[in-house]
Image: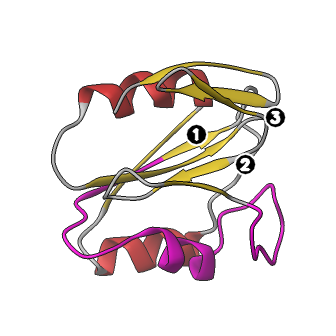
Amino acid sequence: MKIDSTGFGWISVGNIRYNHDIIIFPDGKIKNRYEGFKGDSHSLSKEEAEKVIGSGIEVLVVGTGQSGVLSIPEETKEFLAKKGIKLIAEQTSNAIKTFNTLSGGKCALFHTTC
């Protein structure tokens, strides 16, 4: 799976454009981040991280938005570290490049606006 590109409010994966934040699960399934979402769209809570990761995950890539506004609380970082999951958080345009270079157990959450 290759992420093609992103712009304010959208991301393209495999030539399909999504006009919302997305989650990419380890099996390659893509989900709208806001389906069943509770919380602050500009923060990645521990509870949301629990829903994103799965077994065999080594890396969670987080696209923090076009301007890097999405925050990751210390509680979430500590949770991921205890699970042995490496967190890579970058502005979304950089995070898609990083995601595309990784292999193996990876998942991602991409914030597409600010």
Label 1 crowd bin: few (<14), some (14–19), many (20+), radius 10 Å: many
| Among numbered discs 2 and 3, the one appearing first in the sequence | 2
Q: Nearer the viewer, residue 17 or 95?
A: 17
The Cα atoms of the two marked residues, 3 and 1, are separated by 10 Å
Q: Quadrant of the C terminus?
A: top right
The residue located at (50%, 22%) in the rendering is 94
| Among numbered discs 1 and 2, the one appearing first in the sequence | 1
Give the secondary structure at mark 2. loop
The residue located at (74%, 29%) in the rendering is 10
71 shown above or below 76: above
Q: Amino acid at mark 1?
A: Gly
| Among numbered discs 3 and 1, the one appearing first in the sequence | 1
Give the secondary structure at mark 1. strand
Q: Which residue is mark 2?
A: 70
The residue located at (63%, 48%) in the rendering is 22
The Cα atoms of the two marked residues, 2 and 3, are separated by 9 Å
Give the secondary structure at mark 3. loop
Inspect the magenta stretch and tell me whether residue 50 lies in it: yes
- Locate residue 73, reporting x and y percent: 63, 67
- Locate residue 64, reporting x and y percent: 65, 41
Q: Which residue is mark 1?
A: 63
The Cα atoms of the two marked residues, 1 and 2, are separated by 8 Å
Q: Which residue is mark 3?
A: 113
Query: Residue 98 is drawn in which quadrant?
Result: top left
Residue 87 in the figure: left or right of residue 41 = left
Q: Which residues are drawn in magenta?
A: 34-61
Marks 1/2 in contact by CB < 8 Å: the verdict is: yes
